[in-house]
Image (cartoon, grey):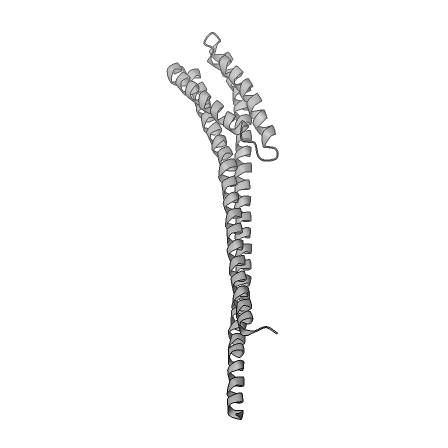
């Protein structure tokens, strides 16, 4: 039969075990949430920024092409030179950060379409061609390619934004699950503590009562 010391040790040990379990659960859940947030920032956010940069650069390149058609060659060429480099940098960033199903196919299509876009752009900028021919090149080749590339970039942006939303929902679910586990463990801890308090009173008072009865009998 267990003595008072063993019973007290057992009770305090149970409480200590519950505290340790709560601590470990908290650390594990915080680590999981931290990793989820890191994945969101490291992968999807980069693709969102790259897609947005491609769209903006492409729009400015389109403006540059129109400027050249309207005769403002200096401003048009300036816009084309700057934004062509920005677009290619953003495209390369996206090609190095392919994480979602279907994302690689879209990024590769953008790369191939942009090669055709640059070739069509050369015809639009070619001053040796007549104005009518340059306009026809713009509306029949360059503008459709512009819309195709922009739509694909927007699809990549939407895919990554949706994945960020889904990852956020998963993180919230994980946090809610962690809270429920913590509540259950705390409830168990309270129950054990209350039982231990009442039991410890009996363990301590029973020997005293026996001693008093023995004294009275003497």
Q: Residue at 54% across / 75% down in the picture?
A: 199
Q: Nearer the viewer, residue 171 or 14?
A: 14
The image quarter containing residue 160 is top right
Name the spot of residue 32 as percent of width and height, x first.
53, 47
Q: Residue at 50% across / 82% down in the picture?
A: 208
Q: Residue at 44% across / 24% down in the picture?
A: 60
Name the spot of residue 93 as percent of width and height, x first.
50, 28
As drawn, which residue projects farthest toward the top? 128
As drawn, which residue projects farthest toward the bottom? 217
Q: How many marks?
A: 0
Residue 67 shows in this picture: no
Q: Quadrant of the N terminus?
A: bottom right
Q: Is residue 41 above or below residue 118?
A: below
Q: Nearer the viewer, residue 3 or 102?
A: 3
Q: Residue at 52% across / 41% down in the picture?
A: 164
Residue 111 shows in this picture: yes
Name the spot of residue 194 as percent of width and height, x first.
52, 72
Q: Is residue 144 above or below residue 154?
A: above
Q: Nearer the viewer, residue 116 or 67?
A: 116
Name the spot of residue 67 as percent of width and height, x first.
41, 19
The image quarter containing residue 82 is top left
């Amino acid at each position: 039969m267990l003595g008072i010391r063993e019973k007290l040790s057992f009770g305090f040990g149970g409480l200590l075990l519950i505290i340790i379990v709560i601590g470990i659960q908290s650390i594990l859940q915080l680590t999981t949430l931290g990793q989820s947030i890191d994945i969101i920032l490291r992968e999807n956010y980069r693709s969102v920024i790259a897609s947005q940069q491609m769209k903006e650069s492409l729009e400015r390149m389109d403006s540059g092409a129109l400027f050249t058609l309207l005769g403002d060659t200096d401003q048009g060429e300036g816009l084309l030179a700057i934004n062509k480099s920005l677009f290619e940098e953003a495209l390369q960033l996206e090609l190095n950060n392919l994480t979602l199903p279907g994302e690689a196919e879209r990024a590769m299509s953008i790369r191939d379409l942009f090669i055709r876009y640059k070739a069509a752009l050369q015809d639009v900028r070619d001053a040796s061609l007549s104005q009518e021919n340059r306009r026809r090149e713009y509306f029949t080749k360059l503008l459709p390619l512009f819309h195709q590339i922009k739509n694909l970039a927007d699809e990549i942006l939407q895919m990554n934004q949706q994945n960020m939303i889904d990852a956020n929902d998963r993180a919230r679910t994980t946090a809610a699950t962690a809270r429920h586990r913590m509540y259950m463990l705390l409830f168990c801890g309270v129950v054990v503590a209350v039982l231990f308090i009442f039991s410890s009173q009996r363990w301590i008072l029973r020997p005293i009562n026996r001693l008093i009865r023995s004294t009275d009998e003497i």
